[in-house]
Image (tube, rainbow, N blue to C red):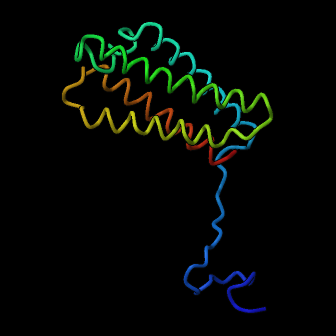
Amino acid sequence: MRPGRNSGQGSKRPGRVERVAVTRVLDPASAKRLALAVAALRVGLGLGAFAVPDVACRPWVGSNGEGPGRKVLARALGGRDVALGLGALVAARRGAPVRGWVEAAALADGGDVAATLASWSALPKVGRVLVLGAAAGAAAAGAVAARSL
């Protein structure tokens, strides 16, 4: 057997990709339950944002950006959340992989964290902490679940 091939030694050849073992944090059944619970919450929040955009926006941005533009953005974010949540739920119901949906949702939540931090000083004090916590928590739950799916 040549060194670097199935001998436990790493390859020294350029362009060769090594496999890295991923440690599961949760068992696959628990990961799927967590992922689908977050997906269901996401659908509910998305529908709420679409139906009553001003109520959905208030905790995050306060009275900033009053007007039709605010409603468009809230509904767009609501639509994003409905699509990501339903994607995971429908995939699970069909017996298809949900990991990609969970990863995409975690990435979207990470974007919400970044957006909140970027505008931190302009956001309502209590709302920014609540939204940051919810978005970071959902991103972390998604990352943990995806790693174990």
Image coordinates for residue 143, horizontal then vertical, percent: 55, 43
Q: Is residue 139 above or below residue 6?
A: above
**Image quarter in which the N terminus is found:** bottom right
Q: Where is residue 124, by image quadrant? A: top left
> Residue 82: image x %, image y %?
56, 22
Q: Quadrant of residue 101?
A: top right
Q: Can you say whether 19 is above or below 42 in the image? A: below
- Left or right: residue 125 versus residue 71 is left
Q: Residue at x 49, y 11 (%)?
A: 48
Q: Is residue 16 left or right of residue 140?
A: right
Give the farthest residue toward the bottom.
2
Which of these two is toward me, 76 or 107?
A: 76
The quadrant of the rendering that contains the C terminus is top right
Q: Nearer the viewer, residue 53 or 36?
A: 53
Identified at 68% across, 44% down, the residue is 26
Judge from the rendering whether residue 117 lies leftward or rightward of residue 76; answer left or right. left
x and y percent of residue 146 in the render?
A: 62, 44
Q: Which residue is the extreme one toward the left?
A: 121
Quadrant position of residue 41: top right
Asked whether, in this view, residue 19 is left or right of residue 54, the answer is: right
The residue that appears at 48% across and 33% down in the rendered structure is 137
Q: How many marks?
A: 0
Q: Position of residue 21 (x, y in %)?
A: 66, 63
- Is 30 placed above or below 131 here? below
The residue at the point 45 percent across, 14 percent down is 49
